[in-house]
Image: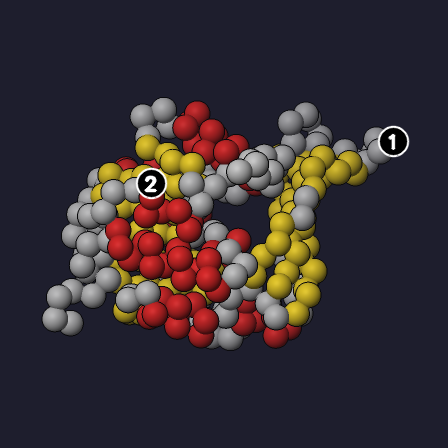
Amino acid sequence: MEPQPDSYGRIAYRDLIAWPERLRREAPLLQRALAPAPSPRVLDLGCGSGEHTRFLNSMGFEATGVDASPSQVDSARGSDPGGRYLLAGLTELKGVLEAGQGGAICLGNTLPHLCEEAEVRAFFTGLASLLLPGAPFLIQLLNYDRILDCGERTFPVVLRPGEAEGETKVFLRLMTHHGGGRITFTPAHLVFRPGSASPLEVSAAHDVPLRGWRRAEVEALLRDAGFLCAEVLGSMTGEAWSPASSDLVVLARRPLPGS
């Protein structure tokens, strides 16, 4: 099979997120969700550059980060040489991971990269076969009920300090809707140099096909794979979900025998 192009090799996503602040916000929910894990072995699925994997390890877990992007896995390994990071897609988990895992997280809008229902089914059923009874599975994606119903086409612009004095990194995210939940996501990294001859330069941009999965679809596919949907939230800070929520966060778990 020919290697697939790495869509995430051109933008330094680690530099575009305020990770210490984000992890502080998410820590209470992560701790609560994973507290019942029947084993310290947990999975960070769609781990990117490994920040959540390292955070889980700092909490006392034995985390394995998994991502389909070679550049993101290389970045994670470079920052955490002692960590465990695997290059694999979400539909390939059963072939690369051991059974007996105590829990899993899949955060950061990773699920929409699976554009077909068959792919999501393969992901959820493969993961279910790896998790111990009672193992929690925390999944977070954007609230596509809101995005699709409102036809939203962009997210707030992210500004970060640039490499040179006076420069600003600009992270722009656009969406093109095609119907049926199909979206072309176009993240772009620009450099703003006020007062220069070329004040705004596109450093990198690419298109990524996504599928906006609605709450009802995610819950139904989890149940079909044998998960119990224990809780649905509207953000990683624990607010109740509503059609206007920023995110869809589902805390599922593998059922215990007899439950």
Please tell me whether residue 102 is drawn above or below residue 67 in the rendered image.
Answer: below
Give the percent coordinates (x, y) of residue 43: 31, 46
Q: Which residue is mark 1?
A: 197
Judge left or right: residue 139 versus residue 134.
right
Color scheme of the displayed model? secondary structure
Residue in view at x 39 percent, y 72 percent: 220
Checking the image for residue 56, the label placed there is none
Measured as percent of width and height from the top left, residue 129 is found at 26, 55
Image coordinates of residue 248 in percent, x first then y, are 45, 65
Question: Could you say which is closer to the camera, residue 139 or residue 57?
Answer: 139
The 10 Å Cα crowd at callout 1, few under 14, some 14 to 19, many 20 or more, is few
Residue 160, visible in the rendered structure: yes
Residue at the far left: name it: 258
- Residue that appears at 24% across and 62% down: 254
Q: Which mark is in front, 2 or 1?
A: 2
Q: Mark 2 or mark 1: which comes first in sequence?
A: 2
Residue at the spot x=20%, y=48% of the render?
100
Is the Cβ of the residue at disc 2 closer than 8 Å to that at disc 1?
A: no
Image quadrant holding the C terminus, namely bottom left
70, 116: nearer the viewer? 116
Instruction: Kindly identify which residue carries mark 2.
Output: 96
Q: Nearer the viewer, residue 167 or 219?
A: 219
Which secondary structure lies at badge 1? loop
Q: Give x and y (percent) for residue 111.
A: 47, 56
Q: Is residue 75 positioned above or below 32 on the image?
A: above
- Asked whether the viewer can see residue 31, the reply is no
Q: Amino acid at mark 1?
A: Ala
Q: Quadrant of residue 35?
A: bottom left
The Cα–Cα distance between marks 2 and 1, rounded to whole angstroms, is 51 Å
CA neighbours of label 2 inside 10 A, class few (<14), some (14 to 19), many (20+): few
Q: Amino acid at mark 2?
A: Val
Q: Splitting the image into 4 quarters, where does residue 10 fall?
A: top right
